[in-house]
Image (spheres, grey):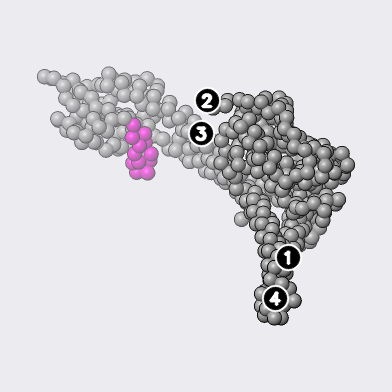
């Protein structure tokens, strides 16, 4: 079922319920006003009939009091003597109402409707006691009115309400369907445009709409905005695929180099040790020295591959969204340990540690092992790119953050390279092939900083050095020690 048909059906159903409620209210109002006065007359005349009994010559007649009693009928039945007493007009037309059983009359008091010879009557029936010699006699009094005119009026009203409501509902459904089709016609344009975009490859297409900014207009605006975002996501996805392809290519290149060295040394060792003693032109000492050098090269390249695989596993963990356990970490002990262990790293530059006592009593929420790994990445990079000069470690504070500052006086970088230094396998052009590394360290460090809710600031100038400031949020409620 289409939306326009469902909308029309809903509106028509609501209109039908409202018409039904309105018709019921009108019918009930007219019914109460039509039969209410008649019921009051019957109650009033029942009192007057009881008080206006006439006894004459043994012929008992019921007399209705006043002009209000005209056109009303009354009869009384005395159970003990089985005597029926009727009003004059009932006797004249030989009309007799049904007499209830004596044991059931008290439960059948009130208003009842009955038909006699096709004529409708409204009967008010009550149980009374008739005064007689020696006491009272139980009886039933029935006062009735002919309701043919009232019934015809209510029947005509019911027919008018039913036919009018049905005709109104049909007209409303027809016009509602027409208006819904007209109102929903812009949706067809949206569907047509969306199909065109779906079958094509141009995500720059937009739906043209010059109507009012109603729900349809806002829908088209939303669809156009969604298409804009999809276009942006598609471009980002293409860039991501390009980055992934570059990552695979760079990883393959980095892995191929140590594998080539290992394979070459193994082949060399195999050839040397397969030669017979009289076939070799090398002495035993030379063979031993060459073997030691080859094994050392194999060990170095194996360590390099291990570091590469470990770094790639760390980045793979970052890509899958996995996190690590965090807890309050005291800054001064951690940074003191980092400074001590960094002094044993291979370096040519001078290692200078600032005043770390200001970190006393300061805590951050994080993982100590990963934080130390991140610090060593920056320090090791500073040593690598500072062939001479000095590398400094200290700390600064700003508002609710602590900044770990690692500054060097090394080769520095060009400002155009700064946005790319955290990309995987990226290394500054001047350092490629000169400084040892695979270009994954800063990517891992950036992931660790992001996981700790921090940020990194870079200040560099080519030929003068580089300064990294790692900003981490402080914990203002340190645990008691």
Q: Is residue 73 above or below residue 322?
A: above
Give the class, few, some or many, for how many residues have Cα within 10 Å of label 1's Cα (few <14, many ≥20).
some
Give the Cα distance between marks 3 and 1: 98 Å
Q: Which residue is mark 1?
A: 261
Query: Which corner quadrant of the image does residue 101 belong to?
Result: top left
Q: Secondary structure at mark 1?
A: helix
Between residues 78 and 241, which one lies in front from this camera angle?
241
Q: Is residue 240 above or below residue 350?
A: below
Residue lying at 81% horizontally and 43% vertically, measured from the top left: 386
In this rendering, the label closer to the viewer, 1 or 2: 1
Query: Residue 271 at what x, y percent from top left?
Result: 70, 76
In this rendering, the label closer to the viewer, 4 or 1: 4
Q: In the rendering, which numbered label is found on residue 480?
A: 2
Verify CB contact (< 8 Å) between mark 3 and mark 4.
Answer: no
Give the Cα distance between marks 1 and 2: 54 Å
Q: Which residue is mark 3?
A: 25
Choose the circle earlier in sequence order: 3 or 4: 3
Choose the circle earlier in sequence order: 4 or 1: 1
Give the class, few, some or many, for how many residues have Cα within 10 Å of label 2's Cα (few <14, many ≥20).
few
Q: Is 158 positioned to the left or the right of 268 in the image?
A: left
- The residues colored magenta run 111-122
């Amino acid at each position: 079922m289409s939306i326009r048909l469902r909308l029309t059906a809903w509106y028509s159903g609501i209109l039908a319920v409202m018409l039904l409620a309105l018709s019921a209210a009108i019918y009930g109002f007219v019914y109460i006003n039509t039969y209410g006065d008649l019921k009051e007359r019957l109650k009033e005349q029942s009192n007057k009939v009881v008080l206006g009994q006439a006894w004459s010559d043994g012929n008992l007649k019921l007399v209705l009091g006043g002009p209000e009693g005209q056109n009303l009928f009354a009869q009384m039945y005395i159970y003990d003597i089985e005597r029926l007493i009727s009003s004059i007009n009932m006797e004249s037309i030989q009309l007799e109402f049904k007499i209830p059983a004596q044991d059931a009359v008290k439960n059948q008091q009130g208003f009842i409707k009955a038909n006699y010879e096709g004529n409708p009557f409204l009967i008010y029936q009550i149980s009374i006691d008739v005064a007689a010699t020696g006491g009272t006699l139980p009886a039933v009094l029935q006062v009735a009115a002919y309701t043919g005119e009232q019934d015809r009026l209510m029947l005509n009203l019911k027919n008018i309400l039913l036919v009018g409501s049905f005709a109104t509902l049909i007209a409303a459904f027809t016009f509602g369907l027409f208006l819904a089709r007209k109102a929903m016609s812009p949706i067809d344009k949206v569907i047509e445009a969306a199909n065109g975009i779906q079958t094509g490859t141009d995500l720059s297409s937009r739906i043209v709409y010059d109507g009012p900014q109603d729900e349809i207009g806002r829908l088209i605006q939303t669809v156009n905005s969604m298409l804009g975002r999809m276009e942006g996501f598609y471009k980002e996805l293409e860039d991501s695929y390009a980055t992934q392809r570059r990552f695979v290519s760079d990883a393959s290149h980095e892995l191929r180099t140590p594998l080539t060295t290992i394979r070459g040394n193994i082949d060399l060792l195999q050839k040397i040790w397969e030669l017979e003693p009289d076939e070799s032109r090398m002495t035993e000492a030379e063979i031993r020295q060459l073997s030691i050098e080859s094994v050392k090269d194999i060990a170095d390249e194996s360590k390099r591959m291990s570091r590469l695989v470990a770094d790639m596993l760390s980045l793979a963990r970052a890509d899958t969204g996995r996190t690590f356990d965090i807890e309050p970490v005291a800054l001064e002990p951690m940074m003191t340990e980092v400074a001590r262990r960094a002094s044993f790293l291979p370096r040519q530059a001078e290692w200078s540690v600032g005043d770390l006592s200001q970190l006393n009593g300061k805590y951050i929420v994080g993982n100590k092992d990963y934080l130390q790994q991140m610090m060593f990445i920056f320090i090791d990079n500073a040593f690598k790119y500072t062939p001479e000069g000095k590398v400094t470690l200290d700390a600064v504070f700003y508002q609710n953050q602590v900044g770990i500052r690692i500054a060097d006086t090394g080769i520095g970088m060009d400002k155009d390279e700064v946005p790319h230094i955290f990309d995987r396998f990226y290394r500054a052009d001047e350092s490629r092939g000169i400084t040892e590394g695979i270009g994954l360290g800063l990517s891992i460090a950036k992931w660790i900083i992001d996981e700790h809710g921090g940020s990194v600031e870079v200040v560099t100038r080519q030929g003068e050095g580089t300064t990294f400031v790692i900003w981490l949020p402080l914990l203002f409620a340190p645990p008691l020690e």
